[in-house]
Amino acid sequence: MTEQTTNSSAPDKRRATKHNKNGWKKQTASWSRWLHTYLSMISFIVVLFFAATGFTLNHADWFSNKPVIKKYTGVLNAKWVKTKDTASVDKLDIVEFLRRTNGLKGSVSDLRIENNDVSVSFNGPGYAADVFIDRDNGGYKITETRLGLVAILNDLHKGRDTGKGWSVTIDLVALFMILVSLTGIIMMCFIKKKRSNGLLLGVLGFVVVYLLYIFLVK
């Protein structure tokens, strides 16, 4: 009697093990499908943005606008710049005054203090402004350049002159797209009828891109 009970329990254990294994596979496939579906919907706009700006970057001459250049003059507090020690020049007050008074944008990419003048450069996506300040009287001249919407989008794509916040955003987008890709691959691995062809096409795509690089990039 004991022997029969032992023998009958063996198939039950195998069935339980198989059931647990299948349950794990189904759960993994389900989570991958759920993640991939919703992440793909969220990433649609991101992919569209980087695809469109990738095209405009590759054909920059097709979309380049004539730069809009404006020049301004003004006078700031001479005490900020007329000092014997160049280290005591009030950089913060100068920059904030120029932003507030002339509406300059972007971040300060360069600020140089010479014997006779102070130069300040502002840069942002599709934007640049150069300021030259006379240290004797506080008079200044500004040359502001705007390159248009396409230039702004291209700089956002490259992360040029966009600040740390946008740089972090690009990193997060990259990680996000990696996650979308990985969940897509995991999903494919669980679809028996399409798994072989899908993975084969993935490998083929990688090989094609690599060959294009080998033969077209010198």
Image (cartoon, rainbow, N blue to C red):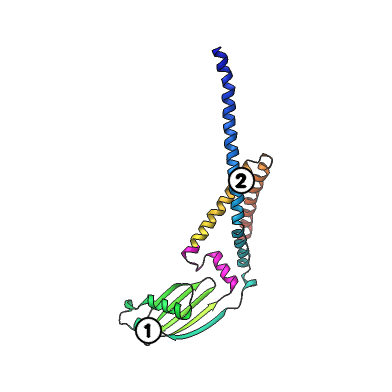
The N terminus - image quarter:
top right
Amino acid beneath label 2? Arg
Q: Which residue lies furthest to the bottom in this view?
A: 137
Residue 218 visible in image: no
Number of labels in the image equals: 2
Residue occupying the point 56% across, 20% down: 9
Where residue 66 sits: x, y (%)?
60, 78
Q: What element carries label 2?
A: helix
Horizontal side, residue 213 vs residue 79: left or right: right
Boundaries of the magenta span:
147-166
Magenta-colored stretch includes residue 157 = yes
The residue tagged 2 is: 33
SS at badge 1: loop
Q: Name the quadrant containing residue 132.
A: bottom left
The residue wearing badge 1 is 77
Q: Specify the quadrant of the image occupied by residue 77.
A: bottom left
